[in-house]
Image (cartoon, grey):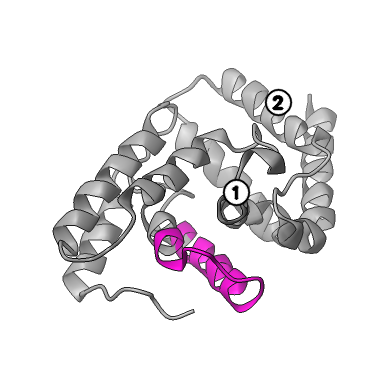
Amino acid sequence: MPAPIELTASQWAELEAAYAQPPRAYHGFGHVRAVLEHVAEVAAGPGWQQPLEVWLAALFHDAVYVAGRSDNEMESALLARRTIARWWPQSAVGLDRVAELIALTARHGQLSSEQVDRDAGLFLDCDMAILAAPPPVFDAYDRGIAEEYHGHVPGWLFRRNRRRFLASLLRQPRIFLSDYFDARYDTDARANLRRTLGQSSASE
């Protein structure tokens, strides 16, 4: 999927710099590129109703990220609003929609497919597709999350909350909100979650 709006080299650099502060083990620009690959996958498959807004939401959704804070998504949405308006003042981008999609990422694991519209469900699934990655990639993601929280949250508390979150995902009738991701990725995601939770149980 080609970028639906052009970014200059300096704009890309500004965005990548945002994703480098503070240093991140998982939620850096590499994660954004992975999400954009899934956005492109959807574009080539079922398609998007608002491709520009989805693409921009993917680009900015973790631009502000400090492990343990509860306002990362809202701050990222605000940054997206300001930056998009500054970079493309004459564009017809739906800023409210971009901000809405970014804010929804705070509710991963809490929403059902009936609570979101089609694009929102697909967008959230693009962000969560890491759950179905090959085991070494999933394990690197899991370690990266732990590394990001190190020093921000006591280790015992992180492990308890992380296990609780992963177990809650596994209990969901559907891990992915869209039919598209559910059909393609549910089996692999559940295998990763079961394996990880089993390893955690064995080590406790």
Q: Residue at x 66, y 21 (%)?
A: 160
Q: Is residue 109 left or right of residue 40?
A: right
Can residue 6 be seen from the camera position used here? yes
Mark found first going from the N terminus, 1 or 2: 1
Q: Residue at x 60, y 48 (%)?
A: 117
Q: Residue at x 85, y 55 (%)?
A: 187
Indicate yes or no whether the magenta region holds residue 40.
yes
Q: Which quadrant holds residue 52?
A: bottom left
Q: Which residue is mark 1?
A: 117
Does residue 115 lie above or below 9 as drawn? above
Compare residues 126 and 149 and report the one nearer the observer.
Answer: 126
Q: Which quadrant holds residue 113?
A: top right
Does residue 135 lie above or below 201 as drawn? below
Quarter of the figure that contains the C terminus: top right
Indicate yes or no whether the magenta region holds residue 134.
no
Amino acid found under the numbered disc labelled 1: Asp
Q: Residue at x 63, y 55 (%)?
A: 130
Can residue 147 be seen from the camera position used here? no
- Identify the element where label 2 is drawn: helix
The spot of residue 94 in percent (x, y) is: 34, 55
Q: Which residue is mark 2?
A: 164
Q: The magenta stretch spans which residues? A: 31-54
For label 1, count other residues whose C-alpha is less than 10 Å away and answer few (under 14), some (14-19) or many (20+): few
The spot of residue 38 in percent (x, y) is: 58, 66
Magenta segment main secondary structure:
helix
The spot of residue 43 in percent (x, y) is: 57, 73
Does residue 115 lie above or below 153 as drawn? below
The answer to whether marks 1 and 2 mark residues whose Cβ atoms lie closer than 8 Å is no
Q: Is residue 193 left or right of residue 126?
A: right
Q: Mark 1 or 2, which is nearer the eye?
A: 1
